[in-house]
Image (cartoon, rainbow, N blue to C red):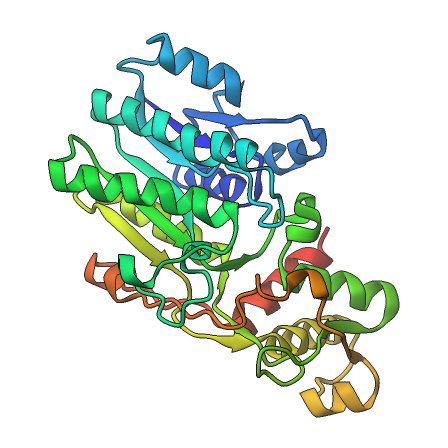
Amino acid sequence: MTIVVTGAAGFIGSNIVKALNARGETDILAVDNLTRGDKFVNLVDCEISDYLDKQDFINLIGSGDFDGEIRAILHQGACSDTMNHDGKYMMENNYQYTLELFEFCQAEEVPLLYASSAATYGKGSVFKEERQHEGPLNVYGYSKFLFDQVLRRRMREGLTAQVAGFRYFNVYGPQEQHKGRMASVAFHNFNQYRDTGKVKLFGGYDGYADGTQSRDFVSVEDVVKVNLYFLDNPEQNGIFNLGSGRAQPFNDVAVATVNACRRHEGKPALTLAELVQQGILEYIDFPEALKGKYQSFTQADIGKLREAGYGDAMLSVEQGVDRYVDWLMSR
């Protein structure tokens, strides 16, 4: 029986495929949209049984070609550009696509693990998987929120197979290079430092001092481990925050990134104050385009994830970024 990974050539999807391969799984159907062909590099060192374009996959699902053939679907395929305001495109790619896979999986009694997002919380200050804390600020967040609402209704009615949605917080790590402006802060900090010897962060805004806006940064290594834990535990259903459970300022990411690079250069680590004093870390004016649409603070409440039995410690920014820079330097 085949495991399907959608968004398989993307950031999280390709890391999941690699992790499945590490377990000896190679009967994997990779589904993606390779209109942007450069994403193929993420699958070069993966073992898959077949590749299908997203639309072909949807058509074959609808025509019954995969009935009885699929073991589980790990659905990572979506438009992840939070600044894309094309609502029709976003709802087709993120909401309708997920809904079609959900209906198929329920009819076929196939587990579905899917990517939701911390964007469902908007500017809220409590990041707990409950309706009163949710209020997306953009159509991307709304597209994720809307399917989460569908799942809640259907859970009350009764499911025929596992469905678990993961509200990813700020994920960083290997194989995100194709994401452009939507790549992680660590990725951009690394490239800025390598290109110019400096790193730039947003200055003060929303009551926060320079570089102190804080997010829950989670390594893709932990994201993959959680997905596989749920694949192994099909009795677990629901919507789960997937973050590190801690908020760290953007300054921490910059310091970790620069010092990991300096380690490769044979140079000593520097403190935040030293980086600023030496002009290695600079602050720029907060962009007008992001004002009112920006999450200045996120921190996943991962209590529900722990209650589901996932007990592994999550990597800190210092640990995860250090490993990520090692990977980037090896390219």
**Residue at the (68%, 72%) spot, across then down:** 260
Q: Can the viewer see residue 271?
A: no
Where does the image place residue 243, in percent across and percent down from the top left? 41, 62
Q: Can the viewer see residue 202?
A: yes
Image quarter (top left, top right, bottom left or bottom right) of the N terminus? top left
Q: Is residue 157 above or below residue 29?
A: below
**Residue at the (64%, 27%) spot, across then down:** 34
- The reply, left or right, for residue 161 in relation to residue 230 is left
- The reply, left or right, for residue 329 in relation to residue 209 is right
Where does the image place residue 73, in percent across and percent down from the top left? 36, 31
Where does the image place residue 40, in percent across and percent down from the top left? 65, 31
Extreme residue in the right direction: 196
**Residue at the (82%, 73%) spot, across then down:** 198
Which one is in front, 302 or 291?
Answer: 291
**Residue at the (50%, 54%) spot, across then down:** 220
Q: Is residue 305 above or below residue 164?
A: below
Q: Is residue 50 above or below residue 318?
A: above
Q: Is residue 163 above or below residue 323?
A: above
Which one is in front, 121 or 226?
Answer: 121
- In the rendered picture of this protein, how many numbered marks are placed on residues? 0
| Residue 257: quadrant of the picture | bottom right
